[in-house]
Image: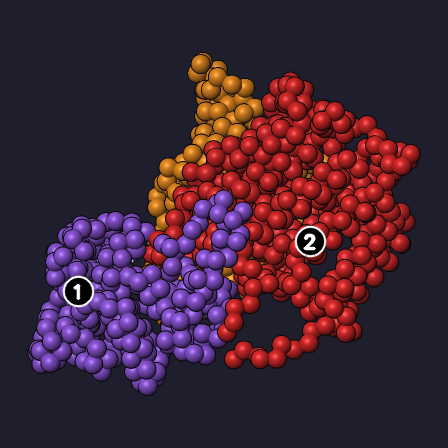
Amino acid sequence: MQNKTIPDTRWMGLPHLAVGLIVIAAIALFGWQFLLADSEIAVLGMVALAAMAAFGVGKTGLNKSMSAAMRNHGRSMNIAILLALVCVIFLLGGEHFPLLMLTTTLLYMTVAFGLNAQFGLTGMVNFAGASFFGVGAYTAAVLTNHSALPPILILVAGGVFSALIGCLLIVPVVRTAGHYSAVVTIAFSVMFKTFLEVNDVLGGPQGLMVGPMKTFGWDFNSSPLLMGMELSFYVNYALLGAGLAALAFMFVQRLERSWIGLTLDSVRLDETASACFGLNVVRAKVLAFTFGNILIGIAGALYGMMISFIAPNSFSFSDSLLMVAIVLLGGLGSLWGTALAAVIVVLLPEKLQILQEYRFLLFSVVVILMLLFRPEGLMPRKVRSYFPNWRPEQ
Amino acid sequence: MDIGLFGQYLANGVMLGTMYALVAVGFTLFFGVLDVIKFSHGDVLMLGSFTGFTVYIGLLSLGIENPWVMIAAILVVSIITTAALGAIIARYLVLPLKSAPPLNILLITLMLGTAIREAVRLFYPDGSNPKAFPALLPTASVDLGGFALRADSVILVAAGIAVIIGLNLVINRTRLGLAIRAVAQDEETAKIMGINYTMIVLVTFAIGSGAAAFAGIMNGLYYNEVNFGMGLLLGLIGFCAAIIGGLGNIYGAILGGFLFAGLQTIGAVALPFASAYKDVFAFGVVIALMAWKPTGLIAERSSDRV
Amino acid sequence: MSEVLLEFKNLGKNFGGVRALDGFDMQVKRGEIIGLIGPNGSGKTTSFNLMTGIYAPSQGEVHFDGADITGMSARKVYEAGIARTFQRSRLCLPLSIFDNIMIGNHARLNTGLWFNLFQRRALRGQVEEFYTQARDLVAGFSEDLAGRMFDPVGSLPMIERRRIEICRALISKPKLLLLDEPSAGMTHDETAQMMDDILAVRDRMGGLSIIIIEHEMGVIERLCDQCVVLSYGRKISEGSYAHIAADPEVQSAYLGMD
Ligand SMILES: Nc1ncnc2c1ncn2[C@@H]1O[C@H](COP(=O)(O)OP(=O)(O)OP(=O)(O)O)[C@@H](O)[C@H]1O
Ligand SMILES: [Mg+2]
């Protein structure tokens, strides 16, 4: 029942790519202004505007045109998105705080992409996301203070250590399923924070200083100059954060659009049947768990270097839950959903200080409602398409 | 180690074990009837002890100071409150998600736990600070060779064990217990036998949550302190205890509770590193146990039929 | 190459106190279609589960294609060449038809990390190749389904799902196909249609042996070279359909049930 004539999904007669680029530009502009907005009223107004726009997108068929653009011009669109992000970073130029917020959001996004490979694809909920994030940050702290390792390697080390610590959990996590596996990561999360608090070498409850990121003679904590204008040193971190999030996105997306993604899905949906068709369930779980932890650890290392001071309180079980909430809100396995949810969960409370105090309460209630009424998330994942621009003749 | 200190640790361990077992029994009951984990259990417990604390403040302001009256009132009000809350959670959050992926119920109750915790922290008067729970029980003690066994400890442990035994009797000896076990065995058959399924589920959740309130009050009376974060740790410990015992098995839950308390005590006294690591040690052992026996020491009945 | 593809020797399984299967001997020759019948709870599915490594047998042996596969893991059994369907359909509902069939094709998928992440062009070649194969296989059952390879399976009616499940088992070109009540929930005509399709596919693949569990006696009569009857975990009769249909013990087993 293939429609021979593909219905015209173009929006206002414009080519899909043009629509896509316009939307990206609009979102970038919006994001730039949103990050700069400083009165609560302005922020609220912009949130309302965004909600209305999101509603309108569905009504006017813009979303169809957008997904066509993503499908047919994936590469151009991705490059455009990255460029837009870089533009926003430079436009924010000298503004410390908005850049810090943006980078934090990007790093949480990276974490959520990692969690998505574990939870969204493979069905292994990791309730210790903040702990692995913390492993990365503490690795960075120790290595910047006690070694001469180049910081880019420290980022890698953050990922590696996080994966290694994950290996301690791998046996119980892989051998158990569902509730049993949940208790392993929850226990680890609580244990990890207690460990940090009582361990003097790691600074106890007060935490540790983290050295700055320096690469190729480029000190990340000195302010770069652009055309004679001095920029905030956070520009460095924001650029790196954007690169990291983009790489994480690319990896998880490619993973999803491959035989491995299929294997992970199958393991999530039915382990017994998977085994009956020769799938190596253990390999799939180990792969997804490690892959996710590496991403989370790298993000944590960069986070540590950026905020330059870390303490156990940033890596609590509640933070882990918030990370899981991002994945749930966005929609399991849906990467764009995850990106959107990361913005909502991380950026919104930062911009609306009244929310900051209430954010755990707010987002737990939101997730409860979501699970009750829209369990597929804000932007539900679509059926896998290995190569979106490949349309087999039918 | 001298005998006095040993006795001290033993008494403390037994107290903790009783408390943990009470919490774990709740997890096991919920899992028994519905095959679900209600992770908000610990925070329901915390709410129970805050309710108790509020009752105490209220009674004080009414001028009632008889400790036994106070304890009775505290227990009655907080147990009824949490029992009702447990039933409401079952009715509006757990049952509607029964046909969803099982993990969703764990997630929704985790989030509910956070919501309860945060709500107490934010909205209870000065909720972010610990509250001094009164010592209402007699504190007279007998000296047992260098170790003072206090009456309040004995009463608490005895009461806790009595509650556990009582619960066990209810499950195994009463018509209600029969209905609960029937539902746990097989929902469809239970329905055909004319058991009001929803009712039994709600009652089970109410019973489990009531037991948690009891544990919460016990905790308050023992440590003379309640705080908004206590439920997370107690809930997690109860969950771990129920899991290492083997979900769905009451004896497993009791075993798991005492095992965990034992691990903590060993971590605090018998190991070379600082006692601050006792929780790290206990959770570490739990994780290792999970690797060794993935479905608990007393294995859960298998449910995945092909 | 011996004539016998599969052999059970004294196979048995206890679940706690329940003897689900007891001293079961059976042989399947290459290219043969065996009907496995018996009242509810007589151990038919259990024998499939023992064969495919879901449960380890409590006693006895399973030999397949010259090798002892007793107690092997499900993965190894699949690699040896046994594929199955499940009594209660076990497809991945959110995944597309194509994805579900590719799960059955797992032995031939390249699941290397490097290949999947970075050799996208080669991956694309593999996807296209298997797409054609899967499509052709599905088309043998239903042209309509073959045109909807990227629809989620959850959106299909039960009958179509059964077909997909059979395709998932067939795509790996197994030596032995196990069908557990493939016609459950179908009308008489639909069942007949599907059996024809299975036979047609089997002819194309050549030499495939099938064990089919089925309550519909018409199907058994038409399809099977040999029948084996189980009751309370024991084999009570075997032989041609005419033979077992006339066997008084079989009749009483069925009557005793009803
Ligand atoms: N995993 C299991 N745990 C416990 N008992 C089981 C299990 N699987 C099967 N049984 C029992 O083994 C016996 C045989 O079951 P089996 O599923 O093999 O029957 P069947 O012949 O396939 O019946 P049906 O026609 O109903 O599918 C039954 O009594 C069943 O209750
Ligand atoms: Mg069967």
Q: Nearer the viewer, residue A359 or A309?
A: A309
Q: Nearer the viewer, residue B56 or C148?
A: C148
* Residue beneath disc 1: C30
Q: Residue B98, how many percent across, how many down?
A: 50, 62
Establish if C199 lies above or below B77. Answer: below
Disc 2 chain ID:
A
Q: Colour of chain C?
A: purple
The figure's colour scheme reads by chain
Q: Residue at x 52, y 68 (%)?
A: A392
Q: Quadrant of the C terminus of chain B?
A: bottom left
Chain whose colour in the figure is red? A
Q: Is residue B133 visible?
A: no
Q: Residue B240, how many percent across, how many down?
A: 47, 41
Asked whether, in this view, residue A160 is left or right of residue A307, the answer is left
Q: Quadrant of the N terminus of chain B?
A: top left
Mark 2 packing: few (<14 Cα in 10 Å), some, or many (20+)?
Answer: some
Q: Residue C233, how many percent across, how many down?
A: 17, 63
Q: Colour of chain B?
A: orange
Q: Is mark 1 within 8 Å of ligand 1?
A: no
Identify the amino acid type marked 1: Arg
Q: Residue at x 69, y 63 (%)?
A: A69
Mark 1 secondary-structure assignment: loop
* Residue beneath disc 2: A78
Return the mark for residue C217: none
